[in-house]
Amino acid sequence: MKKLLPALVLTLPFAASAQTQVSIYGVLDAFAGRNATASAPVAVTALNSGGMITSYYGFSGTEALGGGLKAQFQLEGFFRGDTGDAGRFPGEAMFARNANVGLAGEFGMVRLGRIGNPLFIAAGQINPFGPSTRFSPLINQVFTAAGGNGTLGDTGWSNSIQYASNPINDTTFIAHYSLGEQPGAHNNNWAAVAKYVGKELAVTLGAQNARFGPGISAAAPSQRTYMAAVSYDLKSVKLFASYTDHETKVSLRDGHSVQAGFTVPSQGGAGRWMVAWSRMTEDAKNVPEFHRDTGSAGYDYNLSPRTDVYAVVMYDKISNASKGNTYIAGIRHRF
């Protein structure tokens, strides 16, 4: 009887919460090969984590509250599958990808906590290589330090309030506000994204203003970014194009990126060819104008609905500096 009591106690919350659903999920992505970029032109042969997507794990759940209203939570953390270490880098918070709670209903969804930056999420949806911080020319140039870090601030924002609408005529809107929480300083971030996703055509418009986070300093106390993107699915080929503009205070670091690419399905849709190119042009106070060209080509093949293998070659060149070439192969598994 004593052995049965703990088991009964553990089952009680679940029995009392028949309208609650909790999921455990994640992605483990690893790749190996020769890595070299314009920022680090000396080639390194390595096995790394997070090729097509940064490896992560997550817990999420919903509870039906009645009348179409639901409570929801989301806890997600990054990890490095090549070493088993937590986070994208040493010392990163346990749930740096997402840690939020909110309500959803006919009005849309409102969340509080740490939430993925909607501009980064949108950028990952409008290029052939998705949210890959390693091999997507657009994401690499705009959101990573190694690629130039055109957009300041992180891919996720803490102390956030976010509203996301339900689709109306295939269109959704997201408004995001993040508190800097510094006494006497108005250093809050905001972002807004509108997306239309039809059967063939998709259009994205977005903007953000960053006043705290990675890259923000006395020399660059704030930055405003604008993005416009379009994709069109011709079935035999899907076309992508985008334009991003950055305006940074004090340092007068201004830049814009132009991206174009396409995907071609193969093997009855099980595989796809991916090609993308992006040019980032920048100038700043007392710094001559320069540009960075990054191009990637690859192939991704689904072994199952949850597992795919891929190979990518990437070229990266800064006009007034060096260049680097990358050749890799990897595997991604969703659980």
Image: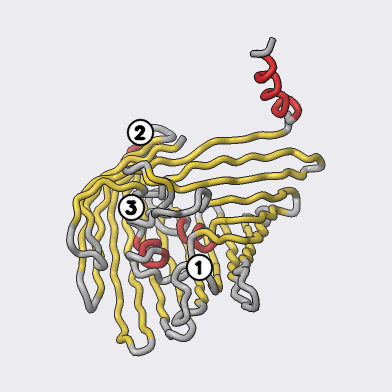
Mark 1–mark 3 CB contact (< 8 Å): no
**First along the sequence among labels 1 and 3:** 1
Up the image or down, 313 lies above or below 245; here it is above
- Which residue bears the numbered disc 1? 213
Question: How far separated are the C-alphas under marks 2 and 1?
Answer: 39 Å
Foreground mark, 2 or 1, reads: 1
Residue 298 placement, left or right of 180:
left
- Which residue bears the numbered disc 2? 303
**First along the sequence among labels 2 and 3:** 3
Q: Amino acid at mark 1?
A: Gly
Question: Element at badge 3?
Answer: strand
Question: Element at badge 2?
Answer: loop
Residue 5 in picture, x, y percent from top left: 69, 17
Residue 134 in picture, x, y percent from top left: 34, 56
In the rendered image, the residue lying farthest to the right is 67
Residue 55 in picture, x, y percent from top left: 41, 46
Question: Element at badge 1?
Answer: loop
Q: Amino acid at mark 2?
A: Leu
Residue 261 placement, left or right of 170:
left
| Quadrant containing the N terminus in the rendered view | top right
Residue 112 in sight: yes
- Which residue bears the numbered disc 3? 274
**First along the sequence among labels 2 and 1:** 1
Query: In front: 260, or 46?
Result: 46
Q: Amino acid at mark 3?
A: Met
Label 3 packing within 10 angstroms: few (<14), some (14-19), many (20+): many
In the rendered image, the residue lying farthest to the top is 1
